[in-house]
Image (spheres, coloured by chain):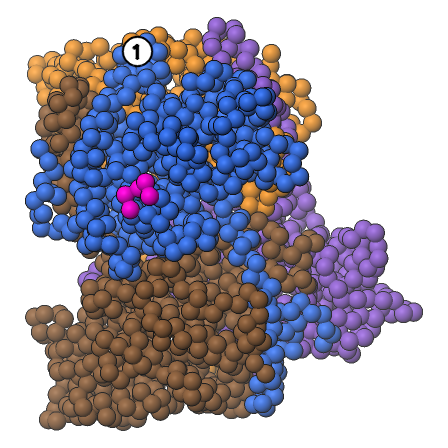
Chain colours: A purple, B orange, C brown, D blue
Amino acid sequence: MSVPYLLNSEKGFVPASQRIPAIAKPFVSERAKKTLDLVERFVEEECVPADAIFNQQIKEAGEAHKQNIIGRFESHPQVIEDLKKRARELGLWNMFLPKNHFKEGAGFSNLEYGMMAEYLGKSGVASEACNCAAPDTGNMEVFAKYGTQEQKDKWLKPLLNGEIRSAFLMTEPQVASSDATNIEMSMRKEGNEYVLNGQKWWSSGAGDKRCKIYIVMVKSDPDNSSKYKQQSMVLVPAETPGVTIQRMLSVMGFDDAPHGHGHIKFDNVRVPVSNIILGEGRGFEVAQGRLGPGRIHHAMRSIGAAEKALEWFLARINDPAKKPFGEMLHKQGVILERVAKSRIEIDSARLAVLNAAAKIDEGDAKAALKEIAEVKVEVPKVLLDVLDRAMQAYGGAGISQDTPLAKMWASGRTMRIVDGPDEVHMLQLGRNENKRGDNLRKKLIAQHEKTKELYKQYGLKHEDPLQLNRISGGKSKL
Amino acid sequence: MSVPYLLNSEKGFVPASQRIPAIAKPFVSERAKKTLDLVERFVEEECVPADAIFNQQIKEAGEAHKQNIIGRFESHPQVIEDLKKRARELGLWNMFLPKNHFKEGAGFSNLEYGMMAEYLGKSGVASEACNCAAPDTGNMEVFAKYGTQEQKDKWLKPLLNGEIRSAFLMTEPQVASSDATNIEMSMRKEGNEYVLNGQKWWSSGAGDKRCKIYIVMVKSDPDNSSKYKQQSMVLVPAETPGVTIQRMLSVMGFDDAPHGHGHIKFDNVRVPVSNIILGEGRGFEVAQGRLGPGRIHHAMRSIGAAEKALEWFLARINDPAKKPFGEMLHKQGVILERVAKSRIEIDSARLAVLNAAAKIDEGDAKAALKEIAEVKVEVPKVLLDVLDRAMQAYGGAGISQDTPLAKMWASGRTMRIVDGPDEVHMLQLGRNENKRGDNLRKKLIAQHEKTKELYKQYGLKHEDPLQLNRISGGKSKL
Amino acid sequence: MSVPYLLNSEKGFVPASQRIPAIAKPFVSERAKKTLDLVERFVEEECVPADAIFNQQIKEAGEAHKQNIIGRFESHPQVIEDLKKRARELGLWNMFLPKNHFKEGAGFSNLEYGMMAEYLGKSGVASEACNCAAPDTGNMEVFAKYGTQEQKDKWLKPLLNGEIRSAFLMTEPQVASSDATNIEMSMRKEGNEYVLNGQKWWSSGAGDKRCKIYIVMVKSDPDNSSKYKQQSMVLVPAETPGVTIQRMLSVMGFDDAPHGHGHIKFDNVRVPVSNIILGEGRGFEVAQGRLGPGRIHHAMRSIGAAEKALEWFLARINDPAKKPFGEMLHKQGVILERVAKSRIEIDSARLAVLNAAAKIDEGDAKAALKEIAEVKVEVPKVLLDVLDRAMQAYGGAGISQDTPLAKMWASGRTMRIVDGPDEVHMLQLGRNENKRGDNLRKKLIAQHEKTKELYKQYGLKHEDPLQLNRISGGKSKL
Amino acid sequence: MSVPYLLNSEKGFVPASQRIPAIAKPFVSERAKKTLDLVERFVEEECVPADAIFNQQIKEAGEAHKQNIIGRFESHPQVIEDLKKRARELGLWNMFLPKNHFKEGAGFSNLEYGMMAEYLGKSGVASEACNCAAPDTGNMEVFAKYGTQEQKDKWLKPLLNGEIRSAFLMTEPQVASSDATNIEMSMRKEGNEYVLNGQKWWSSGAGDKRCKIYIVMVKSDPDNSSKYKQQSMVLVPAETPGVTIQRMLSVMGFDDAPHGHGHIKFDNVRVPVSNIILGEGRGFEVAQGRLGPGRIHHAMRSIGAAEKALEWFLARINDPAKKPFGEMLHKQGVILERVAKSRIEIDSARLAVLNAAAKIDEGDAKAALKEIAEVKVEVPKVLLDVLDRAMQAYGGAGISQDTPLAKMWASGRTMRIVDGPDEVHMLQLGRNENKRGDNLRKKLIAQHEKTKELYKQYGLKHEDPLQLNRISGGKSKL
C-alpha cells in the first residue's frame, strides 16, 4: 500500500515544486523540479515508512547476539539495500555532486540539490538510499576533486556505486580538535610507506562493516613553520593491520548503529606513499576544500527535519483523543504561538541556506564563507527549538521511542558541535564582520564633519561639541 | 563637504548594488541597481548628516515658544525641504509605488523598492525627502487604487508632489483596536453629508501643520449582520470644523515632532458624501488593500536601521579611546559573539522580507499573507535585539541623545504594536498553519499503515502495537 | 582509596554546612548540618565513584544475555546493595520523611532534607542508597499518610527497610494524562474483589525485579457527577495474574535500566477490596496529597545536578590539554559569561526551592501551591541550560558516554513533563495570579481618583481626561 | 480622599508584612513589619497618586519658560515637599542607613529596609519623600562612614534633614568609565587648595537646584605604581567658580527633570584641601565602600517596579472594555503564560536580593560581593521583561505617557549600565567562580581513581581507559 495522501493528490496537497519560495524560483530548472517532486514522493511514501523497519532490523540483530554492541553493528538492514535499488530505478542517485564542478554527478546545482536534501532529511534512511549520505558525500567530493586516477578507480567508483562506505577521521580525543592545528596523530615516512600512530574518535560511519576506507588527517611535519602545513591527508583502508576500533561512542544515549561513531587506534599502521591525497603538508587544504557544500547538505536536511517535527507537532495538536481539560491542543493560544514561531524560524532559515547555496553556485564555497557559517549556526538552533516544542506537545511519547523526535533531537544536538562548535564559527563571523569597523568609524566621523558644516550653514547652535570626539575617540578639551 | 568614505571609493567600499544577496539578484533590474546606489549615496552623504540638523531645528523651534509642545509641532525644519529638492534633482522620488499596479510611480517592483527602503531606513529624514514616508505612501496607494478622479485630483496629486501630508485614522483609545471590528467612531448620513462623532488616537503625522487630509475609518452600519461591512472609510480634511487635536502622544518619551501622534476628537464633523472611499460599508476592504506593501516598507527600513545599529556598534568597539581594562571592546569574545549574532539575524530577516516582496510582486499582497505576517513579527525583534547590543556597548552614550540608538529603539518598539500587535499576527499564522493538521495526521497514519505492511513483509516483530493508535487517536484495546 | 580533596580538607574546600545561603541559615538545625556534611562526603567519596560501576554492571548483565533488554532489566547491581549497607551504617536513611508529619522518618524538615537532596542529586545511585529514591518516597508517604495498618505492615515496612521497591501508576498512553480526569483504566467491584482492566505507561521503577507493589489510579465511578470523585487508588502487587509489562519505554535514547519505565497491561486483574487506599472515589485526594514534598525533592536533586554540571564545565575549561587556538577555554569571555549565568541561575533557583520548602514546613503543601509550581517550572529550565553549556564546552565528549552530562540532560528533560507538563503549571499559576486582577483595577482607579483631587488641589491642568477611562474601561465621551 | 482598596481592607487585601516570603521571616522584626505596612500604605495611598502631579508640575514649569530645558530643571514641584512633611510625620525617614553601621539611621537592617525599598520602587516620588533617594543615600553613607566632623556638620546634617541634595561624579565621557581606573579628571595641589580640571557626565541629580554638593572622583596621582591609588575623592560645592553644567543628558528620550543627568565641566575649580575624603589616593577605597547597600536598594526598588508593572498588566487584561476578538485578554493562554513567567521571575529575583541583603547584614558588603553582583545582573533583566509584557498588553497606551510603563522601562534599562555594565559584573562573577576550577578537576580525578579501584574490586571490564586522561588532560598512549 502506498501513502494515499500523496498519491491521491487529496485536497490540500501541493507538491514540493509548487512550494518553492518565490525568491528561489529562478534558480530551479524544470528538470530539478521534476526530480524534487520525485524525491518528495520517494521519501514520504517509501523511506519514512521504512525508518521503523530499519530500526527494528538493527534491534533484532542486536538481540540475536550475545554481545549487545557488536550485534547491532554487525548487521546490515536489508531494507536499505531494497531502497537503494528502488532509488536507482527512480533515477534518484548521487544528486549531491554539484554540476558546475563534477561530471560524475546528477547535474544539479547546490541550490537544487539543497531543496532535495530537505526532503531526504525527513527520513533516517533516505540519504543513504539515494547515495547522498554523509560522510560519503564529502569524501566522494575529495576523491573527485583531489584524487589520483588510481585513487578514483579504487575508491571513488565503488562509492559512487554505493558498494562501499567511507569515513573521515580528523577529531582526536586528547586535544581540542575544534582547532584542527592541535591534532597529534603522527605520520612518518619509511621507504615507500607511511607509518601512522595515534588515535581518532567521532569517526562517523566506521561502525558499518561496509565502511572500507578512511580519509585520515595526520600531523606529518610538526616542525613546519606554518601551522597550516604540518598536516597531511592520507588514505587508510579499514582492514589495514594495526587499525583497531577501540569502542563505539554514543550520542545522547543513541549508538547510531550500524554506522556509529568509532574511537579508533592506529598502532604502527603502514600504507603506501601513493595513499597521500594531494601531497604531503596539504592536509589543511583538502580539509578546507571538503567543507562548504556538505554544510549546505546538513543544513537543508535539518530544515527537512524541522518541517517533519512541525508536522508531528501539528498532528498531535489535532489528535481528537488528546484533550487535556476538554479541548484539543490546537485550541490553545500558547500552542498556536509555538506553531507560528516554528513556521517563522524555519522559513527564514531555509532562505538563508538557499541563499548560501546560490552563493556557492555563483562562485565557490570560499566566496560563501560568511553565508555558510551563518547557516551552520542558525539552522541547528531552529531545528532544536522546533523539536523541543513538538516533544513537549507529545509529553511522554515525545521523549520515548514512540515518536522520531528524541532521536532527531540527539542528531540535531550534534550539529552544534560537528565541523566545529558554534562558538568557533561565531567568533570567526564576528572577527570578519569587525574588519569593517575602522572604515565605519571613518564614515561616521565624515558624516559628523558634514553635520558640523550644516550647523553653520543653517545657523544652528551645536548642542554637543563632544559628539565627534566620542565617535572618533579624540580627546579635545571642552 | 561630502562624505569622503563613499565618494572616494576608498578601499573596502562596495556599493549597495554589489552587495545584493545572491538569491535576490535575478529580481533586480540594471535600472534599479543604479537607483539603489544613488539612494545609498544620497542617504549616507546627505540625509544622515542632516538628521542632527532636523532634530536641532525642531528643538530650537520648541525653545522659541512659550508653549513647549506647540512650538515643536508648529515648526517645519527647512532642511527637509532642501533635501526634497535635492532628491527630485537626483530622480529619487515616489519610488515606492509598485510598477505592476500604479502608473504614477517610479516603476520599480516591491522587491526593488524594498532594497532602496533599507537605505532610507538609515536616516530619520530620508523617507520624507524622497516622498516615500509613511503614512503617505499607504494613503497614496489608497487614492491611486480606490480614489475617484476628484479625490485623486484633490489629494493624490499634491501628495505625489510632496506638497501636503496625510494621516490614516483607525485606532481608538477606548476599545481594543487590535481587532478593528471594535472601532466605535460613528458616521451617519444627513442629506448630502456624513456626520462624524468620536475619537481617534495614534493618528501619526497629524501633528505636522502640512498634514491636510485624514483617511478615517468609521462605524457606519453597526447593525450590519457582517461585522466586516459595518465600517466605512471617509476623507476628512484636517481643518474641518469640529476636528480637534486633543493632545499629542509620546512614544517611549519621544514626541516625534513635528509629525507626532495625535489624539483627535470629532464633534459633529460634517463632510460631503463624495468623501467616501469606494462606498459605504467597504471600509474593511480598503483597510486590507492598504496593508501589504507598507509592511514590506516598514520591514526593510527596519533592516536598514538594524544595519545602522550594527555600524554604530562596530564603530564603538573599534574606538581606540574606549579601552575598559586595557583593551578595545572588539577584543572581547562576548562582544564579537554579539556582532556575529546580529549579522546572522539581520541577514536571515532581510531574505525573509525580500522573499515576501518577491511573493507580492509575483501576485498580490493577498497571496503573500503568510510571508508578510512572518516578517511583521520577525523583523522588529531583530532590530530591537541589535539595537540593544549596540546601546549596551556604548554604555551611557547609548541611551542618551549622543547616539541615534535610543530614538531608533523607541521607534523599533512601536513596530511590535502598529498594524496589530505581534500576538494577533502570531495567532493568525498559527491558525493558518494548523489548517494542515488533519491532512498531516492522515499522512502519518497512512505512513504507519505502510510500515505495518513492511513489518510483515520483512518478518519482523511489531514492537509497538499502540503507535498507530497514538497517532490516530484511536482507542483499540491492547 | 577515598577522595583526597574532600578528606584532607585541602585549601579551598568548604563543607556544605558552611555554604548554606545566608537567608536559609535560621532553618537548619545543628543536627541537620552534621548530617548534611555527612551526605556530601558520602555522595562525593562513595556514590559518585560508584556511578560508573552501576552502569557497567548493568551493561555487562545486558551483554551476558541473549535478549538485550531483559538482560539489562533482570540484573541488580551489587554496588547498590553495598552502598545501602554503608548508608545505614552512616545513619543516612529515610531522611526524606518530614518530621512534622511522620514519626517513621529521620526527623528533618523539608528544607533540611531539601539541602541533603541537592547532594543526592549529584549521583545516580545516592538517592536509592539512602532509601530516598522516587517513586518510593512518595509512595511511602502515601502509605504513612493514608494506609491501613495492614497495608503499612505489608508494604510500608519493607519499603522503609529498602527491601522492596514500588511504582506509582497514573499516566495512560491513549489519553491526555496531563489532565488526570482523563484516565480510563477501569475498576469494577465483584464480591470481595476489584477487577481491573486497561493500561498504564511511564510506570517508573516497574522494570526493577525488586518492584513488588504498584499504587494504581483507576476510574472506578465514571458516572459520578464530580469528575474528581470518579477515581480510586488501589494497590496491585506486581505478580498479580493478568498484569503484563508490555514493554519498556526509553527516555531520549536511555532505557534507565534496571528501574526503567514500563508500559503495563491489566487484563481482568483481581485484587481484594482491602487493597483500596482511603476508600473508593478518593483517588484524586490521595494523588494530591502525594505531590508537594516530592516536587521539592526533584527540584533540589536538580539543583545538585546543575551544580555537578557546572563543576564538570569548570573542570573542562581549566583542562590544560584542551587549548583551542592556543588558550584554555576559561580565558574566553564567552565561556566566563556562561559560567556567570549558570551561577546566577542556580543560586536564584535554589533560593526559590528552599523558600517553597520553608513554606511547606510552615504549614503544608497546599499552602505552598504557588511556590511549588514556580520551582516545578523554573528549576528544570535552569538545569537544562547549565547542562547545555557544559556539554557544548566538552564538544563530542559532552554528548557521549564519557561524561555524565548527556544522561543528566535526558533525565532533566523529563522533568519538564513528569507530574504535568510545564504548560499546565504555567496556566494554573497564571490563573491564580490573575485572581488579583479585579482588585488591582479597583486600586488603580482609586489611585486615579485621588490624583484627580490632587490636580484640583494644586491647581493643575488635567492633561489626560481619558486616563481614568482607560484604566476603568469606562466609555465616557470627551 | 484616600485609596479605598487599602484603607478598607477589602477582601483580598493582605498587607505587606503578611506577604513576606517564608524564608525571610526570621529576619524581620515586629517593628520593621509595622514600618513596612506603613510604607506600603504611604506609597499606595499618597505617593502613587502624586506621581502624575509631580510630572505635571514639572511640565507646566517647563512650558512657563521660554527656554524649554531650563524651565523643567528650574522648578521644584511643591508636591514633593508636602510628601516629605507627611513622611516625617509618619516616621518614614532615612530608613536606609543600616543599623549595624550607622547610628544616624532609623535602625533597620539592610534586609528590612530592602523590603521597604520594594514599595518605594512603586512610585517615582516615594524614595525622595522618605529621604531614601539615590544618589543621596550612598553619599550620606560616604559622609557617615568616611567624613570628618566638619564635613558631616556641613553636608551630612542637611542631607539627613532633606534640606539639600547631592551628586556623585565618577563617569567621564571621553574614556571607558566602566573601568574606573580610566578616569582622567585631574587634581593638583596648590598651597591649601586643590585645582580640578576635566569633565564628568551622568552626574545624576545635578540638574536639581537643591543639589548643593558633589562628591567627585579625580585622578590625583597618575604616576602611582598602583593603579588603584591614583584616584582621590574630593568634595566640590555646586556653586564653586569654574563649575559649569554643560548640558543635561536624556535617558531613552526622558530628561528626568528636575534631577536629571548632568554633563559638567570643571575649569580650574579650586577647593580647600580639607575637602578631601579619607585622604589623597584613597578614592577607590571610598568608591568601593559606597557600593554594596546601594545596589540592594536599586534592586529592591526594581522588584517593586516589576510588581507594579505586573499590577498594570493584570489590570489591563481584566479591563472589560478591552476585548479583542470578543474576549478579555486574561482568557488567552499566551497572556496567562506571561503572567506566570513574570510571577516566577519576580519571586526568584526577590529572594536573591533578600539573600544578598541578609549576607550583608551578616558581615559586610565585601563578603556579599558574589550575591550583590548576581542581583545587579538578574534584577534589571526581570524588570525589563515584565515591563515589556505589560507594555505589549496595553498596545499604544503602553508606550505612551498614559501609563507609567514607558518611563519605568527607560529607568530600568539604565540599570543594566549604571554602576558598571552587566558585562563587567558577569566577567567578574565568571572569573571568581572559575577559581574553583583547579580544585574541581582534582576532585573529579580523585573520584575517577576511586572508580578504577572499584572496577577491580567488582571484577569489571574498564570500558574507557581514556576517561581519566580526558579529565586530567593527561596524554597517555592507549
Q: Is residue A195 visible?
A: yes
For badge 1, the amino acid type reads His
Q: Which residue is mark 1?
A: D65
Determine the secondary structure under disc 1.
loop
| In the rendered image, the vertical position of residue D307 relative to residue A152, given as above or below | above
- Locate residue D151, reporting x and y percent: 42, 30
Q: Quadrant of residue B423?
A: top left
Is residue A81 toward the left or the right of residue C430 in the image?
right
- Locate residue A427, reporting x and y percent: 61, 47
- Locate residue D124, reporting x and y percent: 28, 33
Is residue C167 a member of the stretch shown in magenta? no
Region rendered in magenta? D103-107
Chain ID, mark 1: D
Give whichever of C177, D129 is nearer the camera. D129
Residue visible at 42% across and 59% down? C346
Residue visible at 59% across and 38% down? D229
Is residue D104 a member of the stretch shown in magenta? yes
Give whichever of B430, D405 is nearer the camera. D405
Name the dominant secondary structure of the magenta segment.
loop
Residue visible at 49% across and 33% down? D277
Residue visible at 20% across and 22% down? C463
Q: Quadrant of residue A275?
A: bottom right
| In the rendered image, the vertical position of residue C364 relative to residue D317, given as above or below | below
Crowd around label 1: few <14 · some 14–19 · many ≥20 (10 Å): some
Q: Quadrant of the N terminus of chain C?
A: bottom right
Q: Is residue B345 visible?
A: no
